[in-house]
């Protein structure tokens, strides 16, 4: 019998990647005349790094049916990442953001995000290839995805539900308060982290997000 089951890979990374625009010279966003294009995304960065190190990796996401989506898929795929499960959204655009260079000594910088209503923010269990997501030895997620929309939160909850087809799941907390629609973000990320098998969180981040102090042992007790 012929099946269309996806190949099992070492790692699957699910999350939004965006096209980035960095100024060609220092200055405020209001003043710089031109920008250079790149890509950015916590999950796709992990995917590209692991692929470059020789692992088999799949990136799963949604992008717009636009040139920026084409650029993301082509660039991430050029690292050897499997992008066959990336879906196109005919109604929503690919997210983009602009960032200035950090000030020397302080790293102060401006960032302007244009990701509200993006294709990836509409990810859900209904429009993501769950079979491809689960066809990995490790599934890598981040708290950023949870902040994008209520549908994304429910998608992560479903993926983190125990089951025979659930891979080992790692979660990078990566809490971004500015992305959340209210004050519930820290609690939602904690809920998700408690369901994951491996959690990446720094001591400073744990204190800022959950108010926990006392080092690694206190963080482990919280989780």
Image: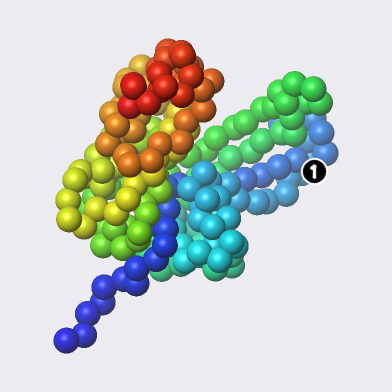
**Position of residue 126 in the picture relative to residue 147 (left or right):** left
Task: Tell me which residue sits at (37%, 54%) in the image.
Answer: 138
Q: Secondary structure at mark 1?
A: loop
Q: Quadrant of the N terminus?
A: bottom left
Asked if 11 appears above or below 80 in the picture, the reply is above
Q: x and y percent of residue 147 in the render?
A: 38, 32
- Residue sticking out furthest to the front: 217
Asked if 18 appears above or below 116 in the picture, the reply is below
Task: Tell me which residue sits at (29%, 58%) in the image.
Answer: 134
Asked if 182 appears above or below 64 in the picture, the reply is above
- Residue sticking out furthest to the bottom: 1
Q: x and y percent of residue 183 in the render?
A: 36, 17
Q: x and y percent of residue 197 in the render?
A: 33, 41
Kindly identify which residue carries mark 1: 24
Task: Tell me which residue sits at (58%, 55%) in the image.
Answer: 49
Depth check: give the residue in front, 173 or 18: 173
Task: Tell me which residue sits at (73%, 45%) in the image.
Answer: 35
Depth check: give the residue in front, 89 or 105: 105
The tally of labels here is: 1
Q: Quadrant of residue 222?
A: top left
Q: Quadrant of residue 76?
A: bottom right
Residue density around tag 1, few if under 14, some if 14–19, many if 20 or more, within 10 Å: some
Colouring chosen for the image of the structure: rainbow
Depth check: give the residue in front, 168 or 43: 168
Is residue 134 in view? yes
Q: Quadrant of the C terminus?
A: top left
Is residue 190 in view? no
**Position of residue 158 in the picture relative to residue 38 (left or right):** left
């Amino acid at each position: 019998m012929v099946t269309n089951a996806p190949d099992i890979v070492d790692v699957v990374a699910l999350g939004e990647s965006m096209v980035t625009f960095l100024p060609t010279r220092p200055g405020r966003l209001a003043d710089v005349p031109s920008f250079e294009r790149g890509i950015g995304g916590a999950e796709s960065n992990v995917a590209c790094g692991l692929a470059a190190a020789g692992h088999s990796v799949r990136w799963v996401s949604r992008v717009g049916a636009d040139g920026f989506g084409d650029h993301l898929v082509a660039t991430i795929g050029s690292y050897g990442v499997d992008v066959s499960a990336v879906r196109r959204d005919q109604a929503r655009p690919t997210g983009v953001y602009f960032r200035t260079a950090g000030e020397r000594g302080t790293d102060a910088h401006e960032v302007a995000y244009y990701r509200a209503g993006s294709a990836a923010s509409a990810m859900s269990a209904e429009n993501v290839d769950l079979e491809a997501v689960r066809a990995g030895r490790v599934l890598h997620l981040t708290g950023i995805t949870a902040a994008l929309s209520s549908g994304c939160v429910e998608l992560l909850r479903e993926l983190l539900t125990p089951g025979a087809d659930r891979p080992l799941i790692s979660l990078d907390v990566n809490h971004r308060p500015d992305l959340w629609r209210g004050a519930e973000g820290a609690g939602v990320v904690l809920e998700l982290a408690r369901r994951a098998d491996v959690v990446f969180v720094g001591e400073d981040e744990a204190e800022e997000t959950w108010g926990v102090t006392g080092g690694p042992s206190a963080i482990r007790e919280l989780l």
